[in-house]
Image: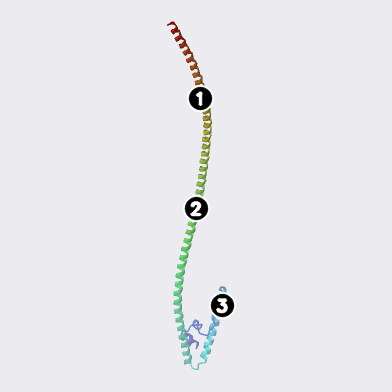
Amino acid sequence: MEEAGICGLGVKADMLEEIPGGEARTDPPDGQQDSECNRNKEKTLGKEVLLLMQALNTLSTPEEKLAALCKKYADLLEESRNVQKQMKILQKKQAQIVKEKVHLQSEHSKAILARSKLESLCRELQRHNKTLKEENMQQAREEEERRKEATAHFQITLNEIQAQLEQHDIHNAKLRQENIELGEKLKKLIEQYALREEVTEFGLFKRLLKISKNVTIHT
């Protein structure tokens, strides 16, 4: 019966694992995966084969048993085809997911590169701003120094002009005083000269009058 079911009809041991009613399997840890998987397969296979044999034993004739095996094989074959279809769909989805993953990784790499370039540009901009700020501060300090120097020079020049004006005022006041004194002296001289002229003219007049009298007497 096993030869008819397995060898004659081509029923594989892996197909017997897909018989409904079987218990769900869970994968063991990675370190024990191979050994425990084999033991679970043997245990499940033995249980499914035992259930199949018990089902076949309920049948009375070999033809019925053969028909049941053929039906079971057909069901397993149909299920295998459905699984293959699902596998193809899943493979397409997997390929699409892998393609999307590659695209996302490429976009992620581009984003990382763009971020790196942006960070580099930001650092360059910060260095440029720092240099510009230092240059502006240096220029401001130089302008302040020049302004202080110009202010000091202007103040010195103003002080010199103020001192010269004060000296000129003193000199002008002295000149005015000298002019006043010279005017008074000149006025006195003019008065003295006028008085002397008057005295001289009076004496000359007296002389002329005397001469005139003498002339009259002789005549």
- Seen from the viewer's position, the closer of residues 6 and 69 is 69
Residue 178 in picture, x, y percent from top left: 52, 26
Q: Residues within 10 Å of mark 1 (few under 14, many from 20)?
A: few
Q: Secondary structure at mark 1?
A: helix
Three-letter code, disc 3: Glu
Q: Earlier in the sequence, mark 2 or mark 1?
A: 2
Q: CA distance from mark 2 to mark 1?
A: 78 Å
Q: Quadrant of the C terminus?
A: top left
Q: Is residue 81 above or below residue 200?
A: below
Q: Secondary structure at mark 2?
A: helix
- Seen from the viewer's position, the closer of residues 191 and 76 is 191
Query: Which is more foreground, mark 2 or mark 1?
Result: 1
Q: Is the Cβ of the residue at disc 3 closer than 8 Å to that at disc 1?
A: no
Q: What residue do we see at 52% from left, 34% from top?
A: 165
Q: Secondary structure at mark 3?
A: helix
- The numbered disc on residue 36 is 3
Residue 137 in picture, x, y percent from top left: 51, 48
Three-letter code, disc 2: Asn
Name the residue beneath numbered marker 2: 129
Q: Is residue 187 above or below residue 217?
A: below
Q: What residue do we see at 55% from left, 85% from top?
A: 47
Q: CA distance from mark 3 to mark 1?
A: 143 Å
Name the residue beneath numbered marker 1: 183
Q: Earlier in the sequence, mark 3 or mark 2?
A: 3
Q: Residues within 10 Å of mark 3 (few under 14, many from 20)?
A: some
- The numbered disc on residue 135 is none
Residue at the bottom extreme, as displayed: 60
Residue 148 in picture, x, y percent from top left: 52, 42
Q: Earlier in the sequence, mark 3 or mark 1?
A: 3
